[in-house]
Image (cartoon, rainbow, N blue to C red):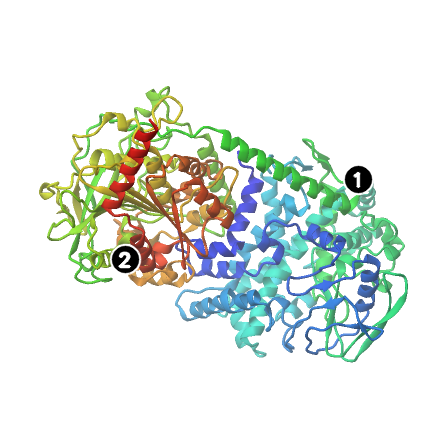
Amino acid sequence: MIPQLLLICLAAYVWRTKQLRALQGITSVSLLDQLRYALADLLPFPLARGQAPLLRELHERYQSPVLRVGWSDISFSGSGDAAFDLELFKSISRLPKSSRTYGIFDPSIDGKHYQTVFTARSMTDWKHGHRKLSPLFRPNETRARQELFNGPLATTLDLIDKASQSSDSLDLMPALRAMASDITCLWLVDKPYGALDALSLQDGRLDFVGPERNLGPGLTALNLDFNLAYRLPWLYESKLYQRFRSSYSTDALQSLDGYASFCQTAVDERMNSDAGLVAKLLDGDEAMTREETIAQLEDFVFAGTDTLTATLGLGLYALYGQPQQVEALRNDLEPVFISDRPRLDALESVPLLVATVREILRIADSNPHLLEKELAEPWSTPIKLPDGSKATVTIPAGYRLGCSGYVLHRDKTTYGPDPERFDAYRWLKLDTASCACYQPFGRTPRACIAQNMATAVLTLVVADFVMRFDAVPLSGSAILENGWTDSFNKLARQTAIDEQQTSEMANAQADMPIAPLFPLYESGQQLESHLVVPARPAHLKDPFGDVTPELGWKVETFAFPAAWPRSTLGSAVKLGEVVAGDAPSPVKSSDMLLLLQTMNGIVERQNAAVTTTVENKDVWSKQKQMYIVVNRYSRINGRMSSSKTQPGTTMILNHTNGHHKEIWEPALAHLIDGDNKDGQRIDEIWSLDHSHFGDSALVNRGRFSMEEYNWADMSRDVLQFVLKYLPKKDQDYTNLQSEPAGKDQKTIRLLPAQADVDPALLELDGLTGSIRVDTKNFASAKPFRGRYICSVGHSQGSAAVLGAASCLPSIFAQVVGLDPVAFPPGFERQELKPLMGLALTRRDNWPNRDEAWSSGKLNKDFYGAWTDEVFTRWCDLGLWHKQDGTLGLKTLYPSEAIVFGDRNWGDGAREVWKRLSLIPTSLSTHIVIPKTGSLLFESTIRELSLQIPAAVVSRIESAHLMVQITPKLTADTILAGLVTAERARHMAASVERSIAARL
């Protein structure tokens, strides 16, 4: 079972992965959720990078020949001598500060340039705020920072402005409030951060456990407590700061309960106010500029989202590594814990508690800030050089310098020979007021405005934690006793172990045999004579008219029985069972607990799914027959493009996850238009709705399971269609035409089964447990039913066509994969995890088409990036009129989620990868990869080209959803690589001659 710890981290990853915002493609989100996505980009760099632990990263920089501390755009290249760097830092920390601009310069030492280089940045003074603009959003930054400034943050304000003009009320607070718990969870329990390996709060005991253990329900309660008590006040940090200052004299901060009550009161008042927080910032008595407001938004997320919680997590870990100090602190606290939760003033009277909080702030200060100073006048300071000699560092006026609090807090002169060790007793002897090397909040009037509040919260929580919980090592884990040095060493060891395990997992997966595709059987059930689906709207009767008028093509809709049985026992509903045909309402993105539970349930069921085998026939023989709805695009005059001796191409299309068969139509319009100018090589095009998507999802309601999905069935459905139901070239469709079936509906007919099916082909990979290689494992020299078949797939659809071609390459002339989802053994693409969360929270219902259109177009990183013609087909053919008069998605959100939640996070994609080697060199294979936004890493793309030696790999200026974003470019690329019938015939004949020569 995937532990809840991983799911928590994965859920947090949903909101922080910037690349995901370009790929989130499966969801329609509310304005509020859009605001959340925009704000998610403001998270500090350790979260954005996702892997490197903050303190470990700083530690590695400190130990390296070149010291680098702080943010990516602030660097200090040190001498390589830690003592020299520390002395310089200590000198800088005593500098006065004034508001000046600054740039890049080399300080001189005794008139000579030294190798120390300070990189500084320009700054705009801010008279309205408590401090100057945040370093993330000052002008003249790196290109990446400028893009961030002009992109998501500007989008945030645009969304707020739009919301203020709408009739629906929107406050900034709910988005930030909902997001807070995600980050709390990550900082508290994410193992790579070295804080608490994991928490399990059960029976009043704090356990350190391994990642394989479930965290238990107690963690949720703790997170909610943290979220309520320590987060919401930060939403009012700047303009309403005076209110907080005055509250220090009240009971608001005297206990956890009072603090929480105070926060909730502020929330209620804010929620009931006519003007939102941002409106007050922009339109108040002292209105701020747009740039200043952007900095405020950044402060709300950064200052109150990660710093305090990270310090708590890291500090508690360090404290519990010293059990004797924990016991001593507990003894000192017992007299004041007469009540359940004593007042703050009583706790502050316990010297050892005050010392413990100071030590936590010293050793576990989570803020990687530089303690920055700006020079109003030239400044010189004596410094000791690495060779032992002394020199003078001279820095001109108008420049800003910074030093690292992390380094200062490990000064051996101040803290003794073992500064890495957690020792609260040192503060019973040290004077913080005179200690220049103790600056968790900075110094001077520009220091952190909330240091008193943060100290109060730390005091309350640490005392409460120590009195309530013990720390016990379990299952081979250990509580560290030698401070952060051991923590770094442990993390380094863990990294090596993880890499070894990843390598071993990759080898194990590579050694596992390819999972065979189960044969195609007849269900023996009475098939439906017809099926009812929504009718095509009149303005789209010509499938390509709005893109390229007068192409002279038409569209017809049919259905055929899906591959039976399905590849796992629970993929289809059993005969006689009645299940709900609709899904419950999507999970609210703010309901993190329910989202995690839902994700956890999907993963557990997928991992527990039982594969269909001969031995469990008594179970799968009771599966209900499912159906696939398919569109046929052909010329109105019925004319084929080629002679009988030289048939043209029949294309079979498979869409990406969460979409439907008509999403291809704008690209097809460009494809056909280009083909008409190039000799008319394309005869027909068939576009399939996967079993859980589009019209297939409607006709299969009550037939398919929303709890299990096996990727192999996509390939089996393609083979089912080609082998058993793809008509011959001269098929008469007169008796198969659709008929009206009431308002906005039509009746579609089933394609008749073909009589020329080779039973041996229906066995697919066979039942021997090993892959039965297609005896005609080359592109057939003869057309299949008078057709040369080109199978095209996009993303998940590429997995379908590549899997089918690897099983029976002899029935295809060419396969085309658009950014295929195929992963090598041991590879995980992390986007699959947050994509499942997005699928579970997406909007699936609208009052009317206009609302669906406007809400979708608002999502500029997804639907808004599509062409209008593509998005029209999402609105008019991806939605349907429900009985209550609203518009709903044809594709149920659980159906999309279970595709992303594939067993072991990607077994289906890894199986496709292993099957690629079965594709013969004689079968033309064209892989199209976007230059940006691909689901494959560059190294994986290179491996992919080696896995299919004969494949042609094209790179285009597009993104993963190339069919939706750049339909013409995608069509032109497919057309440029289209294999002619003559070439396919020569390729196959060449292979036949080669085989005959070898024999």
> Residue 690, located in which quarter of the rendered image?
top left
Badge 2, how many Cα within 10 Å: few under 14, some, many 20+?
many
**Residue lying farthest to the left in this orientation:** 734
- Could you tell me how far apart the alpha carbons at marks 1 and 2 are, in whole angstroms? 67 Å
Q: Tell me, yes or no, if residue 880 can be seen here.
A: yes
Closer-to-camera residue (574/375)? 375
The residue mark sitting in front, 1 or 2, is 2
Task: Tell me the element at label 2.
Answer: helix
In the figure, is residue 127 to the left or right of 990?
right
**Residue lying farthest to the front in this orientation:** 997
Q: Tell me, yes or no, if residue 701 can be seen here.
A: no
Q: Is residue 527 above or below residue 588?
A: above
Task: Tell me the element at label 1.
Answer: helix
Q: Is residue 175 above or below residue 97?
A: above
Instruction: Inspect the image, locate mark 1, and give the three-letter code of the amino acid beneath it.
Output: Pro
Q: Label 1: which residue?
A: 323
Closer-to-camera residue (28/787)? 787
Q: Label 2: which residue?
A: 666
Instruction: Inspect the image, locate mark 2, and give the three-letter code of the amino acid beneath it.
Output: Pro
Please state the horizontal and vertical placement of residue 520, each as a whole percent of the image: 28, 29
Quadrant location, the C terminus? top left
Mark 2 or mark 1, which is nearer the start of the sequence? 1
